[in-house]
Amino acid sequence: MEKSNFFARKRQEYLALDRIDRRRYWTDGLLNNALYILMALFIIYTAIKNPNFVKPGSIVNMIQLAAVSLPMALGIGGCIVLTGTDLSAGRVFGLAAGMSAAFLQNRAASKLIFEKLPATSGGWIIAVMLLVMLAGAVIGVVNGFFVAKFSLHPFIVTLATQLITYGFILMFFQINGNGGGPISNVAKEFKDAVSGPCFKIAAWNVSIPWYVIFALILVVIMWFVWNKTRFGKNMFAVGSNMEAAKVSGVNVFMTTVLVHTLAGALYGFAGFVEAARLGSVTAATGLNNECDAIAACVIGGVSFVGGTGNIGGIVVGVFVLRIIFVALNMLGINPNLQYIIKGAIILAACSLDMRKYLVKK
């Protein structure tokens, strides 16, 4: 009943417009949704050129890739809501992945980063997960503190912490004579607990790994945090108008620090999952991952203007981006060209987002 009333009201509003306004109505609608329209056409084209694109195995693969990317996008989305960004995300992700792999190596492996550690068990796996999330949160606190306390632009602050974190990564990979080489031979218990099959879809003969379930749980938690808590309301208030938020009694400093802290913890969790999924981590793990996360958020409607965005949009943005990358591979597009396409997508999404803001203004 409500839906029918909604469409009836929209129809009446449209009929009340004159010819010029009707033309603008359609033009604005097409431009505001141009990215989604082009992506839908691209997906259809890919499915026609390569039917494997829509087969169950390919669909599950895209779901898995999206699940790996979701935690980082959920974290960086809050930073964008505050009209900022986080360039350190990829390096925090890489540090967490390296730490997870080092602490959860197979104790029988010939080359260990740390010689004296407990055998891998459920409790130790959880402890390592909390440790890497804490490490990410600490870096997030540093980001949030300098942004809020000294009114520095998040771009500058997170660029600095990106370089600092990368320095820590390089030193970490030198521990115990590792010489900067990959950290591999992660324990089977770790891989099974994170990337092992949770359940199987018999009709498709495919398995859904545990980290997909973890990603779903994170989405629910973050939706609750953004929409049902005072922290979420304060975050949107600060992003919309910082001065008005201050007058309303919002603790802008604490809100900014908490947003970056939560983001850092989510990057840490994403790195933890990646270590189990890959089984081998290098110092380059996580390089430029923040670009994908930022692109997913912008595609999903999280505006750099601030105070705008929702968790559902971020989920859609992550899936759309993963689908595009898988499609490019299936079409045999040169991997070097994919970087150009990725940059063009970010530029187009930001341009369309700014256009919508200027039209509203």
Image: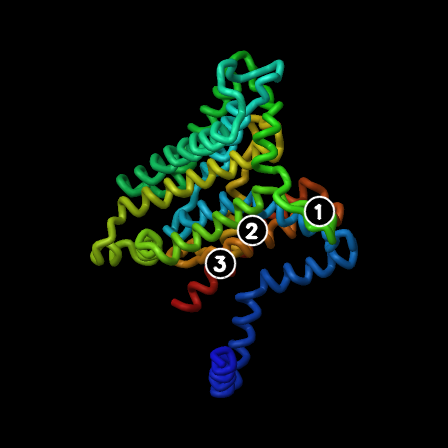
Circle 1: is it few (<14), some (14-19), or many (20+) Cα within 10 Å?
Answer: some
Looking at the rendered structure, the secondary structure element under dot 2 is helix
Q: Which mark is residue 301?
A: 3
Cβ–Cβ below 8 Å for labels 1 and 3? no
Q: Is residue 319 left or right of residue 336?
A: left
Circle 2: is it few (<14), some (14-19), or many (20+) Cα within 10 Å?
Answer: many
Query: Quick check: can you spot residue 160?
Result: no
Q: Which mark is residue 86?
A: none
Q: Residue at x 70, y 48 (%)?
A: 328
Type of the residue with mark 2: Val
Residues at marks 1 and 3, CA–CA distance in whole angstroms: 32 Å
Query: Quick check: can you spot residue 297?
Result: yes
Q: Is residue 332 left or right of residue 226?
A: right
Relative to 240, is 58 above or below? Answer: above
Type of the residue with mark 1: Val
Circle 3: is it few (<14), some (14-19), or many (20+) Cα within 10 Å?
Answer: many
Cβ–Cβ below 8 Å for labels 2 and 1? no
For disc 2, the marked residue is 318
Q: Position of residue 275 (x, y in %)?
A: 57, 32
Type of the residue with mark 3: Gly
